[in-house]
Image: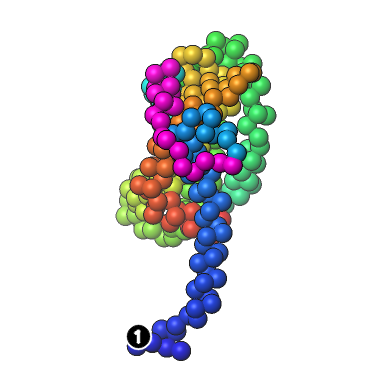
Amino acid sequence: MTGKTGKMKRPFGFKLLFFILIIVIVIPTIFPFLWMFMSSFKTQVDIISWPPRLIFNPTMRNFQKVFEEQNFLLYLKNSFVVAFTAVLLSLIIGLPAAYSIARFGQKRLLMLILVARLMPGISFLMPWYILFSRIRLMDSYTALILSHMLIALPVVVWIMSAYFESIPPEMEASAMVDGATRQRAFVSIILPLSMPGAVTATTLSFIYSWNNFMFSQVLSMEKTRTLPIAVYNFMSYAEVDWGGVMAAAVAIVTPAIILTMIFQKYVVKGLTVGAVKG
């Protein structure tokens, strides 16, 4: 059946099935965050009560504990410095590497980088710990930034190599015929065209670094600890302060959510190109 515009009208059953599928996909994703957000305003009694209390008297005490009893602002600064610097250095190194892989067909190198990304981070932890202990870089930004580049650099290379492959080589070839060097063509032509991919790689790398717990827990001390440690500080051998844990988690995840929402269309476009070409 067709409407005035000539488009086929979808049957009601199809629309209902599509709506149900959307709910099935969205609820498992959103439910943990909603539960975390609600629990951050609950008392300990309300959090552990069964059945769960959906109606309760909200309190800001949990957030007060996060910002007053924990060194939250220092952790926030440390997280930003480490994530920003690790992502920046990964872009400086990863963008030319991804371009070289895409243009010269270095697929084996790309697979090697992917294997490095898929390896569990804990396998790198002991070598890093021994190395930084010997050269006296424990509890330093340098140690954390280098360790976080293990996360950010493979993401940048993997996403951007697929994106550079989607750009016709004739574009920089034309610039080189006009006298530009390959480096000049890369900076002036290829990078501006690949901006959605670069934004995608930057956003994902920043989020992965921002949320990383393991490296900060082992390689840092009081001076350079990052935000995920704020959650861990509410856990002890005898008790877990669930209200503090939930409030700290909300404070940590909010910047990542805002960043993702701001660059959402670029992330979707960049991942789509990577899926098609990769």
Q: Residue at x 58, y 16 (%)?
A: 132
Front in this rendered view, residue 244 or 209 = 244
Q: How many marks?
A: 1
Q: Does any portion of residue 87 appear in the rendered image?
A: no
Q: Is residue 14 left or right of residue 237?
A: left
Q: Position of residue 243 (x, y in %)?
A: 50, 29
Q: Position of residue 216 (x, y in %)?
A: 54, 23
Let me know if residue 32 is in the magenta part.
Answer: no
Q: Residue at x 49, y 24 (%)?
A: 230
Q: Which residues are magenta?
A: 51-69
Q: Residue at x 38, y 42 (%)?
A: 258
Q: Does any portion of residue 129 appear in the rendered image?
A: yes
Q: Position of residue 253 (x, y in %)?
A: 45, 37
Let me know if residue 62 is in the magenta part.
Answer: yes
Colour scheme used in the picture? rainbow
Q: Residue at x 39, y 18 (%)?
A: 68
In the image, residue 159 above or below residue 20 = above
Q: Residues within 10 Å of mark 1 (few under 14, many from 20)?
A: few
Q: Position of residue 186 (x, y in %)?
A: 39, 47
Front in this rendered view, residue 211 or 55 = 55
Front in this rendered view, residue 7 or 187 = 7
Front in this rendered view, residue 200 or 217 = 217
Q: Is residue 118 left or right of residue 268?
A: right
Q: Is residue 35 left or right of residue 173?
A: right
Q: Can you identify the residue that label 1 sits on?
A: 5
In the image, residue 112 above or below residue 271 = above
Label 1 element class: loop
Please state, as top left, top right, bottom left or bottom right, where the C terminus lies in the image.
bottom right
Amino acid on which the number 1 mark rests in the picture:
Thr
